[in-house]
Image: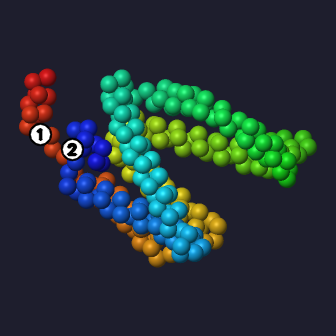
Amino acid sequence: MAAGYFCGKTYSRIQVFAVFLLSIGVSLAAWSDSKDKKTSEGSAEPVFNVGFLIIFVAQVLSSVMGLYTEATYRKYGPQWKENLFYAHILALPLFLPFMPSMRRNLVELSKSTPLELNIPFASSLPLTRVPSQLAYLAVNVLTQYACIRGVNLLAANASALTVTIILSIRKLISLLLSIWLFGNTLSVNTLLSAIVVFGAAGIYSVAPKPTLKPAVVEDKKKV
């Protein structure tokens, strides 16, 4: 939202309040999660501070990129498929320095325990054996593709702030699912942060849009 202000955007007071609550909820969730995972009082705090700083910088850069994408879509049209393609194809050279490590990991994954797969509508064929870790990797790639495709489609139809809020909620839901799936204990602070985040999202969804300035309204009437 702060990046939007610097770019000339205006927000209603209710939207500002909702984003403020959302920021508190996300910060509380991150702090609560790190508190549950820490092993000792002295070693966890510096790691958490550095991690929180990295997340903050990444969030700022992500918001700037979202505003730039929104401006691009406004000028050239919502060509989200083109954006999805170039964002990934131009990033591929960045992985070249990690090719040896990626190759070693791929070899290790190929040596994992075989997973027997039944081919649908072909019960007469023998079972297909695939390394389990490679199968899980393929499923992860497909789900990540569906996720990033949905994010780009959402960015083409919603504002950058709305996309950021939805992604923050998605991250919190992922945290809650991981706690439930892996049998971890849901702390009171995490539950409180979830209530704050979902409540803030509800407030933002019903918040009125900011009214345009008189000069802007007059310019639109002239056009």
Q: Which residue is mark 2?
A: 10
- Residue 222 in the image: x percent, y percent? 9, 24
Instruction: Look at the image and tell me whether residue 63 can be seen.
Output: yes
Q: Please tell me whether residue 223 is drawn above or below residue 208 in the rendered image.
A: above
Left or right: 171, with 104 as reference point: left
Q: Which residue is mark 1?
A: 213
For badge 1, the amino acid type reads Lys
Residue at 15 percent across and 44 percent down: it is 211
- Residue 202 location, quadrant: bottom left
Left or right: 10, with 18 as reference point: left
- Evaluate if marks 2 and 1 touch, with contact meaning CB atoms under 8 Å apart: yes
Q: Secondary structure at mark 1?
A: loop
Instruction: Look at the image and tell me whether residue 158 can be seen.
Output: no
- Residue 61 in the image: x percent, y percent? 41, 43
Q: Secondary structure at mark 2?
A: loop
Q: Please tell me whether residue 187 is drawn above or below residue 119 in the rendered image.
A: below
Residue at 53 percent across and 75 percent down: it is 41
- Residue 139 in the image: x percent, y percent? 68, 46
Q: Nearer the viewer, residue 220 or 98?
A: 98
The numbered mark, 2 or 1, whose residue comes first in the sequence reads: 2
Badge 2: how crowded within 10 Å, few (<14), some, or many (20+)?
Answer: some
For badge 2, the amino acid type reads Thr
Question: Colour scheme in the image?
Answer: rainbow
Residue at 66 percent across and 32 percent down: it is 96
Q: How far apart in space, not on screen, are marks 2 and 1 (Cα)?
A: 9 Å
Q: Please tell me whether residue 108 is drawn above or below residue 78 in the rendered image.
A: below
Residue at 86 percent across and 44 percent down: it is 128
